[in-house]
Amino acid sequence: MELSSDFIKKNQHFLKSCILYEVLQKKSVFGAFKSFCYTVGKNAMEYPDFEFWFYRFYHGELDFDYDRSADPEPKTIMDMPVKLMRRIAEHVDPVGRSYLRSMNHAIKSVTDSLPPTFENIEIVVWDTSLSWTLNKQFFSCNNKCFEEFTSVLKKPNLQVNRLSLQIYEETTSRDDILPMPFNAKSVFIYGQTTNQVVELLSAMTPRYLESISLDGMYSIEREDYSMIFETDQFKKAKSIKFPLNMEFNVEDLVNFSNLKSFKCQLRSENTFEDVPRIRDILSTFEELESCELDYYVVSDGSKTRVFAMALGAEIPIEPLAPFERLTITHRYQIPESNECLEFKLKDESLSCRVNIVKIRC
């Protein structure tokens, strides 16, 4: 005979007999509850009630008519001391905290008081899919499930040491991905257009952001450079790396005076005129610690030797060994200073790699 769900719920002695049976099978409370639900139905009894009777029977207390009304009110998570909630939240990783804070208002307040810090966040957006990495946890799905990820990013005071944004969809905007402002110490942005890259860069918190690396923007024009230079993020950054498709002139270097380090491609029309200007401009940068220039000159010839000659450096006359590339080191003392700019020149296939470090003479 098939029993109705109403009969099962109303017949408490029947339900308790089923629980006692599960106890006698020596199952764990979770395994027993799963078997119980399979037998009598998922809605026959709530888990807390099942757990209460399970452990009574387990300890040999077999009174089916025990009156629970005299028992003290059972504790819930809301009765947990705030100090204990905080200790739990402190031992949960930032991903887990985003789920923990959704449980109730009290836990949300506690978890929000602990700013989550990620070592690394990577986001890759394609036309119909996206993937992201939170520290070492990798996720991938279609764009419809992105709300699950953005709920993590919207955690108040979230901080990340390294953020990577690779956007392969031209219509993707900043508002689709990041809340504002976003606290990242180092950011790598690959975008389809200059507007997209600048929009994403503008989501970063100035001053908190220290290092910037940009790529993409294959249709960028020289007049677009100012869009980057004029952002507060660029003006407050300490380090920046530009893509090779951005060719700078010597006069562009004046925009880099606030940086401790930078890397870019530099185009020259006349090495003997431009190299002394490069040296003199960099000599005035008080914050500069090092930089790397991929120096490209329009005319053909030995770019490294000509660069060295323009610096007044000694040029080695010994023949190079097979496959050896020419390298030259030269120090220039900054006027009225005890510091020098050390130039290390290395011949590349299409350019001269110039590494410059400020040192004490």
Image: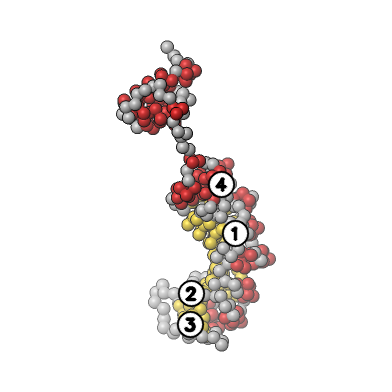
Numbered label attached to residue 360: 3
- The structure's colour scheme is secondary structure
Secondary structure of the residue carrying tag 1 is loop
Mark sitting earlier along the chain (2/3): 2
Picture quadrant where residue 321 is located: bottom left
Mark sitting earlier along the chain (1/2): 1
- Seen in the picture, residue 142 relative to 162 is either above or below; the reply is above
The image position of residue 187, as x and y in percent, is: 54, 60
Number of residues whose C-alpha sits closer than 10 Å to that of mark 1, classed few (under 14), some (14–19) or many (20 or more): many
- Seen in the picture, residue 138 relative to 194 is either above or below; the reply is above
Measure the alpha-carbon separation of dots 1 and 2: 37 Å
What's the residue type where badge 2 is placed?
Asp
For this orientation, the residue located farthest to the bottom is 336
Mark sitting earlier along the chain (1/3): 1
Residue placed most toward the observer, 124 or 107:
107
Residues marked 1 and 4 touching at CB (< 8 Å)? no
Measure the alpha-carbon separation of dots 2 and 3: 26 Å
What's the residue type where badge 1 is placed?
Met
Mark sitting earlier along the chain (1/4): 4
Residues marked 1 and 2 touching at CB (< 8 Å)? no
Q: Residue at x 53, y 52 (%)?
A: 113
From the image, tell me which residue sits under label 2: 347
The image position of residue 274, as x and y in percent, is: 60, 79
Number of residues whose C-alpha sits closer than 10 Å to that of mark 3, classed few (under 14), some (14–19) or many (20 or more): few
From the image, tell me which residue sits under label 1: 204
What's the residue type where badge 4 is placed?
Ser
Q: Which residue is drawn at 42% across and 12% down?
A: 1
What's the residue type where badge 3 is placed?
Arg
Secondary structure of the residue carrying tag 3 is strand
From the image, tell me which residue sits under label 4: 151
Measure the alpha-carbon separation of dots 1 and 3: 34 Å
The image position of residue 108, as x and y in percent, is: 54, 46
